[in-house]
Image (cartoon, helix red, strand yellow):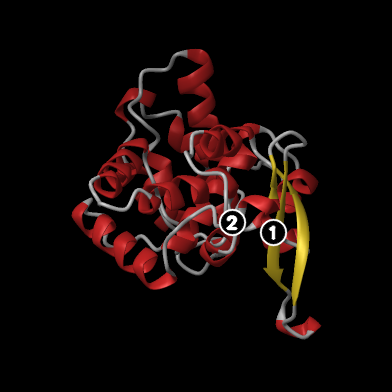
Amino acid sequence: MTAESWLGDIPLSDLQIKHFAVWRDERLLKVKPNTVMRELRILRVLIDWARDERGAEIQGNPARHLRVRGTGDARAPFFTDEDEQRLLFELSQMSNPNHLRLTKLALATGFRRSELLSLAWRNIDLKKNKIYVQRKECAARGGSNSISIVPLPSNAKKLLRSFESKEGKVLSITKGAARNGFDKARKRAELNTLRFHDLRHIAISRMWSSGMNALEISACSGHRDIKMLMRYSHYQLSF
């Protein structure tokens, strides 16, 4: 049951996740999960292309809801625009505006929560579009901290310019308060399985989708292993 023969029988506008699930289960009887995952990623991209560039009548992309057990994609979050708006709304209702700012910066940069909370305005050069980020090396390298010079994404720059204060810490919020606030917001937004670290995954996936290459993305994310970085690529056709 190839994707081509399967897709040919169903109008694009009628495609639902159940169709993909039947195809996935049939393919898993014949090939390994990673093979199915590669084919599914291609289908996701093709449906996006047909909808966005050829005007195909289909709501969203049902292929993005599907997961394949036994692959790195099994835990990957599916995060719609509606999900994002609900989450940001709940964060905006909190008395400390830094709850909302933290999440928006995470989605704009792909930084870890600890990296964002440690940021000071002296670490940011808005004129040269650079951020000096304190990052922890992996355990194999001793686990010591190092400073990375990271290009400042345009949407993150716009967000930072909107902040009133430009002195001291960028985000005036403790780690505990940030964790508790995010947990409350995601539950109120009915995103119970979403973790803050998933925002990093989502941000890097969006970087791939925007056309950035592996070197540009790794400069932002801090990944030294390109293979590890590729796990975040939901939009790539080469694996």
- Residue at the image point whose x is 36% and y is 40% from the top: 80
Q: With 99 as the anchor, is 150 left or right in this view?
A: right
Which of the numbered marks, if any, corresponds to residue 133? Answer: 1
Question: Farthest residue toward the top?
Answer: 55
- Residue at the image point whose x is 45% and y is 28% from the top: 8
Q: What is the three-letter code of the residue carrying label 2?
A: Phe
Residue 181: x and y in percent read: 30, 61
Residue 1 visible in the picture: no
Q: What is the three-letter code of the residue carrying label 1?
A: Val
Q: Are discs 2 and 1 less than 8 Å apart at CB?
A: yes
Residue 134 visible in the picture: yes
Local secondary structure at mark 1: strand
Residue 115: x and y in percent read: 59, 63
Report the number of numbered marks. 2
Q: With 53 as the anchor, is 226 left or right in this view?
A: right
Local secondary structure at mark 2: loop
Instruction: List the residue tagged with mark 2.
Output: 111
232, 46: nearer the viewer: 232
155, 39: nearer the viewer: 155
Categorize mark 1 by other alpha carbons within 10 Å: few (<14), some (14-19), many (20+): many
